[in-house]
Image: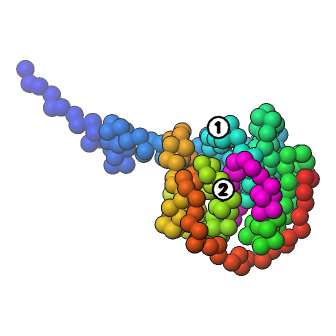
Amino acid sequence: MTRKPKTNLRALLPAPLRRLAKRVLLGSTSYCAHIFFRMLINKTQNFGHVKWLGHPIWQNILDLWVIQETIAELKPQLLIECGTNRGGSALFYAHLFDLLGHGRVITIDIERMHNLVHPRITFLIGSSVDPHVVKAVGASVGQCSGPIMVVLDSDHSAPHVLLEMQLYSPFVTLGSFLLVQDGVIDTFAAFRAWRPGPLHAIRVFLASHPEFTVDGERSTRFVITHHPDGWLRRVRLAAASQSLPAATWQGAHTLEHGS
């Protein structure tokens, strides 16, 4: 009895599917995560319609959960946010502080895009790198005796992020965090038009700031993240000789407190 020749099923597949099958069979977690992440970004329009209690927040919900865990662990006395946008994230932080019975928020943006009011939130209107704004934030920092955390989520261009890091990192207390958001711009092809972005700034900053280190566990907590290498923990005080650059960007400096 003549045997039928074996059919090479793999050869029947188009080359792209063969490569995909190979990667899946080899257990390429990172590749599968990338595919899922791309689908998630497309489906949610980059989380553009995510809301917190009805207020637009525009955040990856997995990253928000890591922020919640960190706030609960750290219990900051003050959280400084650069990039208010429509206010949902500042409100999210304030509500967490309500539950903890402790903490307040200073959030900064060049314009007001919301009508939110919360007793724990101070809204500052102006560029985050305007000397007047930085001075106002510094005055509030000077009144704190507990942990201070900083979240950078405004202009994501590398030069701006780097300047923000230089200006706001001194406010971060020992053991606390400087969270630089949206480094995904530098790793995800769909966002290449906005490069170089935050991840580039992070690498430049870390090269001259050994007092900060990347908390890899927080950055990869749920495998996918908008903030690769974005969780920077202060592990030591800065050298006394380390000085801040002059903030040369000028902007409006009308301040709105508690409204």
**Disc 2: CA contacts within 10 A as few (<14), some (14-19) or many (>=20):** many
Q: Is residue 124 visible?
A: yes
Magenta-drawn segment: 137-156
**Residue 132's x, y, as percent?**
81, 71
The residue beneath circle 1 is 73
**Residue 170's x, y, as percent?**
66, 62
Quarter of the image where one finds residue 243: bottom right
**Residue 213's x, y, as percent?**
51, 55
- Image: 17 above or below 4: below
Q: Amino acid at mark 2?
A: Val
Discs 2, 1 touching: Cβ within 8 Å: no
Task: Please tell me which residue is depicted at 56% across the width and 66% down the height of the picture.
Answer: 239
- Is 254 left, or right, of 193 in this rendering? right
The residue beneath circle 2 is 172
- Is 56 left, or right, of 241 in this rendering? right
**Residue 52's x, y, as percent?**
78, 40
